[in-house]
Amino acid sequence: MTVLLSSYITERQHIVNKSLTSFVEQTNIPTTLKESMLYSLEAGGKRIRPVLMMASCESFGGDYNSVMTVALALEMIHTYSLIHDDLPAMDDDNFRRGKPTNHRKFDEATAILAGDGLLTLSFKAIASDPQLSAEQKSFLVRELAQASGPEGMVGGQILDLQAEHMETALHELEQIHRLKTGQLIKFAIISGAYIGGANKEQLQALESFADYTGLIFQVQDDILDVSGDEQLLGKPIGSDETNFKSTFPKLLGLSGAIEQKQMYVQKAKAALHSAGLENSLLDELTDYLSNRDY
C-alpha cells in the first residue's frame, strides 16, 4: 500500500470515527442504550464501507463531505449487524476487535436493542440530512433498505446459517456473500458515485466492480481466519471452522481461495476500466482489500 493511500485511509477513518461518536452523542437516547450503541461503534474497525463511499464520490469529482451522513448511516447498519451476529443465537462470539462483544459487555437484551437502535437511526440520519435533495434521499433510503434487508444482507445471513455443517458449491457460497457481505459494499460504492455525479453508464459498470469487490473482501476475510494474526484481527483464528461455516478455503483449499480471489481482482479492475477509473483511488483500494492483514 502506498504512503498516499495509507494516509488517505487513516484520515478518512479518523473523520468517520469522530463523526459517528458526535452524531450519536447528540441524540436523545436513554443512557444505557446510548452507551451500548457507542460501545460497538467506538470499538474500532476498518471503516472500509465509508472509505469506499467517499473514494467513489471523489472519483467522480464530488466532495466527500456530501456523503458523510450517508457513510455514517451505512456504518451504523454494519455495526448493528455485527452486534446481532455475535449473539448466542447467531455466531455466539465472546470477542470482537479484541474487546468483549456487546452482549458480554452489557447483556443480550441491551445488545439486541442497541442493534435495533443503530438500524433505525441510520434511516433517520439520511432522511434528516439537509445536504441531500428529496430525490437523493428517496434513492438512498430505498437502496440502503434493499442492501441491508431480507433481499440483501439479512437474506445472506440466513443462507449463511443454513449452510453451516453442509457442503456448498462455489456458486452457492458466492451467492451467500454477494448478499451478506457484498450488498453493503455495493451500496457504499454506488451511492458514493451517484452523489458524486456518475452517469448511468458509469453506475452500471460500477455495479460489476462492486460485486467483485464484495467477494474480494469476503475471500480475504476467510483467508485471514485461517492464516491471519489473531492480535491484528482482534478475534480467535479458526472461528469459522469452530462455527462450522462454509468458507472459500474450506471449499477450495487455501491456495485455491487465493487464486479465486485474484480472479475476482482481475474482474473488478476490468469493470473499473469500463467505468473510466483505471489507476484511480478505487483501483488502489481494490489491491488494499485483497492484501489487507486485518
Image: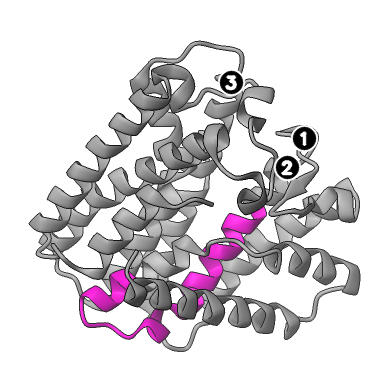
Q: Residue 22 appears at what percent x and percent y? A: 67, 84
The residue wearing badge 2 is 86
Indicate whether 161 appears above or below 205.
Answer: above
Query: Quick one: label 3 or label 2, which is nearer the N terminus?
Result: 2
Asked if disc 3 and disc 2 are in contact, CB closer than 8 Å, the reply is no
Secondary structure at badge 3 equals helix
Look at label 1 and name its amino acid: Asp
- Assign the magenta stretch its main secondary structure: helix
The residue wearing badge 3 is 162
Query: Quick one: label 2 or label 1, which is nearer the N terminus?
Result: 2
Q: Which residues are magenta?
A: 55-80
The residue wearing badge 1 is 92
Query: Quick one: label 1 or label 3, which is nearer the N terminus?
Result: 1
Q: Which label is found at residue 22?
A: none
Asked if disc 1 and disc 3 are in contact, CB closer than 8 Å, the reply is no
Q: Residue 187 appears at what percent x and percent y? A: 39, 57
Answer left or right for 235 relative to 179.
right
In the picture, the quarter occupied by the N terminus is: bottom left
Q: Residue at x 53, y 27 (%)?
A: 159
Asked if disc 2 and disc 1 are in contact, CB closer than 8 Å, the reply is yes
Indicate whether 191 appears above or below 128.
Answer: above
Residue 104 in sight in this render: yes
